Amino acid sequence: MTIGVYNNQFTPETQIYILKGVECDAMNNTYWGVYEDKESQLQFFLNNFEHKVFNDFTYQRVNGVVNIEGDFDEIRKYNYMIYKNRKAGAGSKWIYCFITQVGYVSDSVCSISFETDVIQTWRFEIEDSFLPSYIAYEHRDRWYKYPNQSLMPALNTQPENIELGTEMISYEVDKLFDDTINDWCFAVVTLTESASKNQTDRNPKGSLILGTPTPLYYYIFPFNIKTGDGFYNDLTCIDSGGKSHSITNLSDVYGAITQTSKWVNKCANISVVQNINGIKIENGQVKIDNHFKVELCYGGSTEIETYYIMPLQHPTFQNMNYGYEKSNKLDILSMLKTLIDDKESKLFWYPFCYSMVTTNNGAFKFYKNELWKKLDSVYFTMVSSISSSKVDYMPLDYKYYSLNNFLASLSESFEDSYEINLPIVSDYTASLMQSSRNSMNVGLNNTIRSNEANMAIASATGNAMSSIASRQNNTNISNSLEQQLNQLNNQSAMNDLALKNVMLQGGGSLAGIIGNGLTGNIGGMVSSGLSGTTNIMGATFQNDYANQITMNNVNTQNNIARNNANLNTSVTNIQNALRNQTTKYMAQTNIQNAIDTYNARLRDARATADTIVTGGTDAIRYFDIGLYIPWIYILTPQYEYIQKAKQVFSVRGYATNLVELPNLHTRKSWNYIQTVKCNIVSHDIDVVDLERIKQCFDNGITLWHTKDIANYTLNNDELTDPSQVDKYGSILSHKKGD
């Protein structure tokens, strides 16, 4: 029985299939790669899904309603319909539809409402009419292969709207350098004066580093962190001329710093440098380029052979083949495959994954994996300076690899800014002797001069005392003579008076007068001499005599006073001279006291513990834990976020944001495509249907290449040969628009 609308214009020859269990839907999921052409398309549906066929229906119009025979409870289980209006002409085709509603008409009749499945209906017209379009998301090829190369992850770094959490998990990859490099360091001893025995190198103005003047002098001593000083017995240096030199160990250097006069109080700093460009250590030998030389320096009990830093030239920094320690080959790609998987290559890139270089002391730098030239061949090199412990670990072929520019790569280096300084201990006795050497020499000389001065002072004091005694005795004698002379003068005056009296009186005994005078009986002499004279003459002679006596006494006193004054002047002069000598003696005594004090300090110094000039940094902990060793790590989100991202990428692919042909069938099980203003041009597709098709692709649609729609556990590997894919995951033919 045929049920439908009768129309005199058409013979009722329309054929209808209704199907059960078809899993495609109107907008999101559809079959695509499960058949090869229009004929096999129909057979796919009929062979894989339970169906019923109805013949001799009248012409069916798009998105209509048809009544068919059947029990409602049975018919309502069917969800898909295919029909063909046979008499519609040569161009008649199968129309694929979604059953949108099953209605009850009677116990034996049901009404079916249907809507055209525009994707299945125009499947092959769509594929033939697609033009390059703006693709927001799609399943892209995740790996590519250049000739003679292994598979490499395609570079896709377009932002994804996926939550990654706030914490990243780090996974250890490897050390940047072998232990043969990590175990070696260089102690750079900085002096304020040259320790070179070569007079031509002992420039008082300091040294030149890269043409830059500095008042400091740098000496380099390599040392092995693990093996210690015993290793130095076999350590030699091969200079640029091929000459071999033995290397002094660091312990002897410490001895020189504290005990050798050329080094004591001259050490400004001892820093530890992980690497010095232009110096290599290989198999127990130090090799240097022509910017360094081996120089014999002052040492302690033995002479110290060390590196004297010659001026460095800029061409050294352009030469990456000498003096720059190149790291191990780091295969980050293999580690990523192990940590994540070898499917979703986008998880290798930032922000889902990135690398970190650190020395585990708090300093680190992140590197985006996608910016390495070859992810399976990552290299670093060390760059450092003798003036600091800071080391830059410079990536090679990272970000600026096309430029091959040293300075550009240096700008991306990881700087370990931890300053490693060794402690400097000052030998108190040696330091005191060194710092007081000049004053000590002056004190000794002054002691000699003081002894000589003491002898001179003693001699001068003795001479002065003798001179004073002699002058005092002479003065006493002179004064006594003056007094005796005065007496004689006075007696002479008396005698003269007596003679005059005799002459006047003519009487008296001359002998008696003289006798009285000689005996000092002046009164008797006068009485004898003047007896018989007139009173007038006697008074005259007596006055003359008195005046003469007075004059004699005055002259005598004046002469005695003058003698005493001369004595006092001489004594004063001698005393002043003695005082000056005594002052000099006291000065010499003070110098001797200073020397005695210095000797006392020296004895105290020998009993005083050495002092720490600088404690340095925590070098022992730094080396013991290995905080100087650079490591590279892989950082990923926590597991749950990685799994979430995998699921998202598995279902709908990667953000693309490119204009090219979409990948309609490049995976085994499904392809997701989402476009922006899908670009399909066809004169065969109905205009209304064409707009709906474009809407489907703009909203995002999954094209399934298997009957098992929505089974995301299926293998969905790429079908394209990786050699036909570029580094960004684009299929080469699609880029050309073919």
Image (cartoon, rainbow, N blue to C red):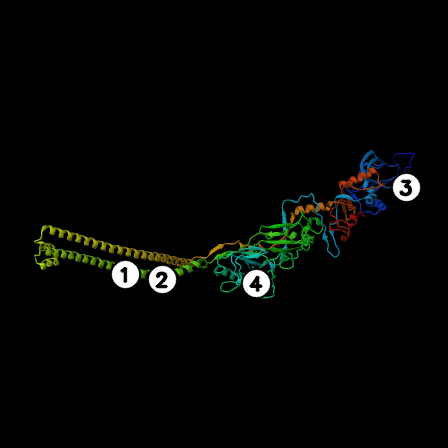
Residue 453 magenta: yes
Residue 235 numbered tag: none
Q: Secondary structure at mark 4?
A: strand
Compare marks 2 and 4 and give the one earlier in the sequence.
Answer: 4
Towards the viewer: 497 or 193: 497
Say which quadrant the N terminus sits in.
top right
Towards the viewer: 284 or 696: 284
Quick check: can you spot residue 175?
no
Which residues make up the magenta segment?
448-456
The residue identified by callout 2 is 452
Towards the viewer: 733 or 98: 733
Viewer-side label of 3, 1: 1
Viewer-side label of 3, 4: 4
Residue 90 numbered tag: 3
Viewer-side label of 2, 4: 2
Amino acid under disc 4 = Val
Q: List x then y, in percent, for residue 555.
A: 21, 54
Q: List x then y, in percent, for residue 68.
A: 85, 36
Give the alpha-carbon distance from disc 2 to disc 3, as whole Å.
144 Å
Viewer-side label of 4, 1: 1
The residue identified by callout 4 is 294
Give the alpha-carbon distance from disc 4 to disc 1, as whole Å.
73 Å
> Mark 4 and mark 2 in contact (Cβ < 8 Å)?
no
Residue at the far top: name it: 105
Quick check: can you spot residue 722?
yes
The residue identified by callout 1 is 466
Give the alpha-carbon distance from disc 2 to disc 4, as whole Å.
51 Å
